[in-house]
Image (cartoon, rainbow, N blue to C red):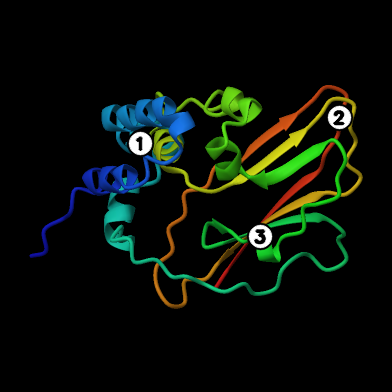
Amino acid sequence: MVKEKNIEAVILNAIDSTVGLFSHAQELRQEARQAFLRTGLPENKSEEYKHTPITRLLNKNFSFDGQYATGEPGDVGIAGVDAYQMVFINGKYAPEHSTIDGADGVEIGNLSDAIAKGDQVALTHLGKHVNFQTDGFAAWNTAAWDNGAYIRVRENTILHKPVLIQHLNDASAGEVITVNRNLFVVGRSSEVTIIEKYDSK
């Protein structure tokens, strides 16, 4: 008989491998780690997950051994759509496949870069719009994210092209686990259209 692993302990080990990233966000990430330690994964008694045996599914279908596929991009973009484009391959930002320049009054980039350099707007909003104290998935994400889209639109700015965030996941050579966090900060009297697209093989 195969002994069932303690999936929450395995996830906590995965969190600990990345929780030290981003010195400017250490307090928040450690707080989220403690929240996950306290809440764990949602149980069936939770209304949102009562029909989803999360622990059993993760035990059966996922490995957290860190051997993730590297992946290569497939088709990038959406035919006929002219957009600023951010591409993430297996969770990692791929600037060589992205086109994010040329928008006045708008910042588009990898959230990890903004946090690493101490962007005060990003730091002010990071972790403020999701309740990671009571949701185990939100706590996990807040403590362990490592890449993601950061879009800041200043006041009185209309972005006439959409921003396409495309996630390309290639699991053909091995399992892919991604922990991304997106942050969008839009000023007053401003407009932006954001499209998020997921492709996998």
Q: SS of the residue at dot 3?
A: helix
Circle 1 residue: 42
Identify the mark at residue 95; answer none if there is no mark.
3
Image depth: mark 3 or mark 1 in front: 3
Give the x, y percent position of residue 47: 43, 31
**Gap between marks 3 and 2 measured at Cα:** 26 Å
Q: Which x, y percent locates residue 181?
A: 55, 42
Quarter of the image with the N terminus in it: bottom left
Tell me whether the residue at label 3 lies in contact with that at label 1, contact meaning CB atoms closer than 8 angstroms: no
In the picture provided, is 130 more to the left or to the right than 65?
A: right
Q: State the residue position of label 2.
A: 190
Residue 118 marker: none
Query: From what the image shows, is residue 117 above or below residue 17?
Result: above
Q: Which residue is drawn at 33% across and 32% down?
A: 33
Residue 36 quadrant:
top left
Q: Identity of the amino acid at label 1?
A: Pro
Q: First in sequence, mark 2 or 1: give its number.
A: 1
Q: Nearer the viewer, mark 3 or mark 2?
A: 3
Measured as percent of width and height from the top left, residue 65 is found at: 28, 61
Secondary structure category for the residue under label 1: loop
Q: Distance between the residues labelled 3 and 1?
A: 35 Å
Q: Is residue 91 above or below residue 14?
A: below
Q: Marks 2 and 1, Cα distance to the nearest angstrom?
A: 37 Å
Mark 3 Cα-neighbour bin, 10 Å: few <14, some 14–19, many ≥20: some
Residue at the image position 85 percent from the left and 35 percent from the top: 105
Which residue does the image show at 44% across and 63% down from the upper left?
A: 176
